[in-house]
């Protein structure tokens, strides 16, 4: 069994992904993509009909505490610890660009 993909196979995958590869990257991916495909083949060999499914190796139940109402926090005290605010609002950096 071969230990790496052909140059043409790697270039075919690169075309499908619409990426350009250097010669060094092609050589690297010939080996890495072959290893990845071999691992996928191992997964395909698992007999799901007869092999027992393993969810977790130990039986553990999640213990949740009861919700308890507490005292309200003082808004003025909270705003003392906020680095940037606008009136009663806390300003945070934008995380998602549209």
Image: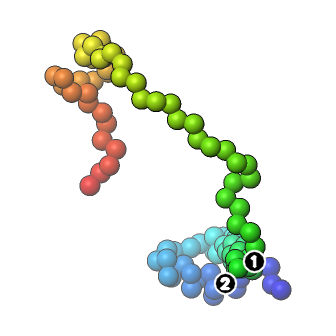
Label 2: how many residues lie within 10 Å, few (<14), some (14-19) or many (20+)? few
Give the image quarter of residue 45.
bottom right
Dot 1: element = loop
Dot 2: element = helix
State whether residue 98 is above or below residue 30. Answer: above
Compared across the picture, whether 43 is left or right of 71 comes to right
Q: How many marks?
A: 2
State whether residue 15 is above or below residue 82. Answer: below
Of residues 50 and 20, which is closer to you in this image?
Answer: 50
Compared across the picture, whether 65 is left or right of 62 comes to left
In the rendered image, the quadrant that contains the N terminus is bottom right
Residue at image coords 63%, 87%: 8
State whether residue 12 is above or below residue 62. Answer: below
Q: Position of residue 77 (x, y in %)?
A: 29, 12
Q: Position of residue 6 (x, y in %)?
A: 70, 85
Label 1: how many residues lie within 10 Å, few (<14), some (14-19) or many (20+)? few
Compared across the picture, whether 94 is left or right of 34 comes to left
Residue at image coords 36%, 19%: 70
User: Real-space Cα distance between discs 2 and 1?
Assistant: 39 Å
Residue at image coords 75%, 73%: 51
Residue at image coords 23%, 24%: 85
Circles 2 and 1, Cβ within 8 Å, touching? The answer is: no
Task: Give the labeled residue for mark 1.
Answer: 50
State whether residue 37 is above or below residue 82. Answer: below
Task: Give the labeled residue for mark 2.
Answer: 7
């Amino acid at each position: 069994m071969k230990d790496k993909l052909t140059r043409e196979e790697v270039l075919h995958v690169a075309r499908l992904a619409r990426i350009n590869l250097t010669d060094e990257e092609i050589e690297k991916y010939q080996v890495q993509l072959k290893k990845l495909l071999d691992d996928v083949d191992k997964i395909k060999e698992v007999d799901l009909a007869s092999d027992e499914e393993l969810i977790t190796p130990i039986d553990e139940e999640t213990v949740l505490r009861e919700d308890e109402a507490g005292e309200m926090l003082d808004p003025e005290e909270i705003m003392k610890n906020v680095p940037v605010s606008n009136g009663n609002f806390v300003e945070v950096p934008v995380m998602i660009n549209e």
